[in-house]
Image (spheres, rainbow, N blue to C red):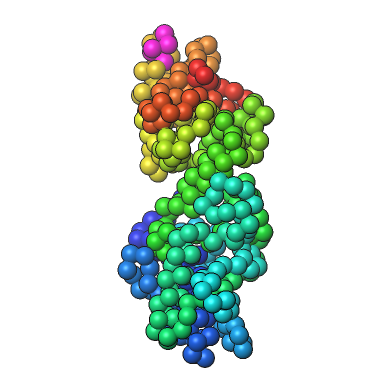
Amino acid sequence: MSRVPEGPLRRGWTTGACATAATAAAYTALLTGAFPDPVTIRLPKGQTPSFPLAKRKLGKDEALAAVIKDAGDDPDVTHQALVQARVRPGEAESGVTFKAGEGVGTVTRPGLQLAVGEPAINPAPRRMMTEAVREIAEQHSARPDLEIEVSIPGGEALAKKTLNGRLGIEGGLSVLGTTGIVIPYSCSSWIHSIHRGIDVARAMGLAHLAAATGSTSEAAVQKLYGLPETALLDMGDFVGGTLKYLRAHPVDRLTLAGGFGKFCKLAQGALDLHSGRSQVDIGGLAVRLAELGADESLLAEARRAVSAAQVLELAAGAGLPLADLIAGQARQVAEAQLAGRVAVEVVLFGRKGEILGRSPV
């Protein structure tokens, strides 16, 4: 996760909010012949933001409108992407139906909130668009039967920077957003991907999942157990969000994998491992060394250390299994979060993928 800039952060709009705005503008034009610009929509919590149009096109039986997504100060992969909606009248009593256009993915695996074969337009954005269509239809005494095709030009390339491929969403991006608002650095899309990864793995009947803090530990734990890609969770710093979701949606077995420093924080009880929200207690590591029988000179060196890696190096030089101890303590914290619903272990890896320490299984 990138460093959060200093000062007040500007909020932005989700892809779902942008798709709703484009839909509202296009449908209004289809009924009236004129595009509202800017177009105003209502979000789930009652806010009424307005969006300028970046593109518009009116045909005989269809209309297209587009807005440029502004994610505020969030490092969102879809910031400045063009989100467009093409609307066409649907069959009588068909209601609102959705279609994936260019750059919007299609669901190919079970376990997500959408059926296999459906456009990757999540339930909350679907509700937002459907409610906008019904409101506009009522204003103009029209029937709210409409096909909405959402597209994000260039979305297939952008999707390669996301976890969509691992989730079985092919051909482009997902249209996301629960509230319509992007809160900078909340990393809601990352946490959403973790949860959906768990859902897909469960639907596929996988009993053993591995959640890793980074790519090196992920590759190492996959090799260690011969796990399929769908069993891997790109947890990053969000160990708390991962464990809490697994407590409610359990599997048989979970392996937590990562570096020594990250898991020192978990062993301390921290559930967010980002450097801006938790720090390693060097003094606490010295106490752990004392528990392992370190002499006073080694403890003095450990207390002067400036990093967890330096303390680990001191422990290794003295033949003390500090990494195993930390892995075991991290496992205890994880077990408490999982409330006994998932068997969990912790494996600590070095920069080359070598095992540094391991909790009991």
Front residue of 150 and 61: 61
Residue 10 lies, in percent from the top left, at: 39, 64
The extreme front residue here reads 93
Residue, x 59% and y 83% (percent of image)? 62
294 to the left or right of 235: left
Residue, x 51% and y 71% (percent of image)? 96
- Asked whether residue 229 is in view, the answer is yes
> Is residue 221 one of those drawn in magenta?
no
Q: How many marks?
A: 0
Position above or below: 245 against 260: below
252 to the left or right of 186: right
Rendered image quadrant of residue 40:
bottom left
Q: Which residues are magenta?
A: 289-294
Front residue of 213 and 351: 213
> Is residue 290 one of those drawn in magenta?
yes
Residue 1 lies, in percent from the top left, at: 49, 48
